[in-house]
Image (cartoon, helix red, strand yellow):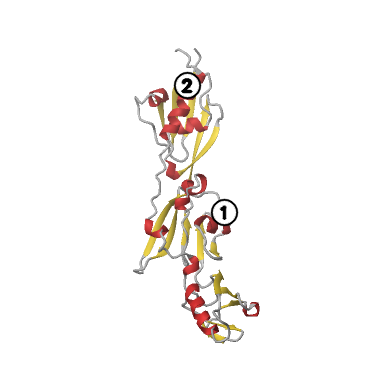
Amino acid sequence: MKRISYLTLTAVMLTAAALAQPAIAQTQVPGTLLGENAPSASDAPIGPRDYIEIRVFQDASLNTKTTVGDDGRITMPLLGKFEVSGLTPSDLEARLKTMLEKYINKPDVSVTVLEAHSKPISVIGAVTRPGPVGITGNISLIQAITQAGGLANGYGRSLYVLRTAANGLTEQIAIDIDDLMVNGNSDVNIPLRANDVINIPIESMINVYVLGEVMKPGKVQFRSSQRPTLLQALAEAGGPTDRASRTALLKRTNETKSLNYLRIVDGRSPDVVLQDGDTIYLKGSFF
């Protein structure tokens, strides 16, 4: 049997494996979620236990940082105790301007929700610190993931933003994680709303053992959503050595298949989808 050129075969193997990778679909986030009318975290109504800041630019003594009481009210100098629950920051600014007009000529007021404890954004699944995260003004998807400690091992291909729509039903927005975190696509780094839940599913891993005449024999791992193939596993193991034959043995449970992987490379045979625990043994050539 004629010995296969190592450099040529390796180049073909790596190219074929790259082509075998499933294409990452561009997540199409509905335009209404990104448009000017999409309410962000800072537009959400104020509620009990929210921590807010009020600034009156004409009189610094009226500046206030306070937590909304369980009764939905706050206390301010000059104005005493009054209801704020259910008002958006813009609504409260307008109300405060009206209330302060008897004391200040044309008062200029700003309201910021520093921490929205009444309607927290939560991140669950494959992050370092799952749970609610504080909202500081507008917050994006990447900022929320960062506040949750970043991605943890075992995350899958996609994450899901769950939110309550205007009709009371739950919307699910799918985001490709590589598009967000690796490609840096700003279109999918969506602004979040109060009460949003970011679910980053933990995905099971597929372990495949590649032995014999490969450059890096041992275990290779894939996410289950990748649907790994024989060529991908050989490429992950560094490709064949210059002593490799064209025969690969695929051992699975109680059966062993003999495969000519060169026929897969040139398209004469279909690639083989692997399962967890599969063993691939690449035979050597003595001629």
Amino acid, disc 1:
Gly
> Is residue 74 shown to the viewer in this render?
yes
- Farthest residue to the right: give it: 61
Q: Position of residue 49 (x, y in %)?
A: 55, 76
Residue at x 54%, y 79% (from the top left corner): 106
Q: CA distance from mark 2 to mark 1?
A: 39 Å
The answer to whether the residues at label 2 and label 1 have Cβ atoms under 8 Å apart is no
Q: Residue at x 52, y 77 (%)?
A: 48
Residue 100 in the image: state x and y as whole percent: 55, 83
Which circle marks residue 9 in the picture? Answer: 2
Q: Nearer the viewer, residue 31 or 273?
A: 31
**In this picture, is 157 found above or below 240?**
below
Nearest to N terminus: mark 2 or mark 1: 2
Q: Which mark is residue 253?
A: none
Label 1: how many residues lie within 10 Å, few (<14), some (14-19) or many (20+)?
Answer: some
Residue 164, relative to residue 60: is it above or below?
above
- The answer to whether residue 204 is visible is no
* Residue at image mark 1: 150
Classify residue 53 as left or right of residue 89. Answer: right
- In front: label 2 or label 1: 1
Q: Amino acid at mark 2?
A: Leu
Front residue of 134/213: it is 134
Q: Secondary structure at mark 1?
A: loop
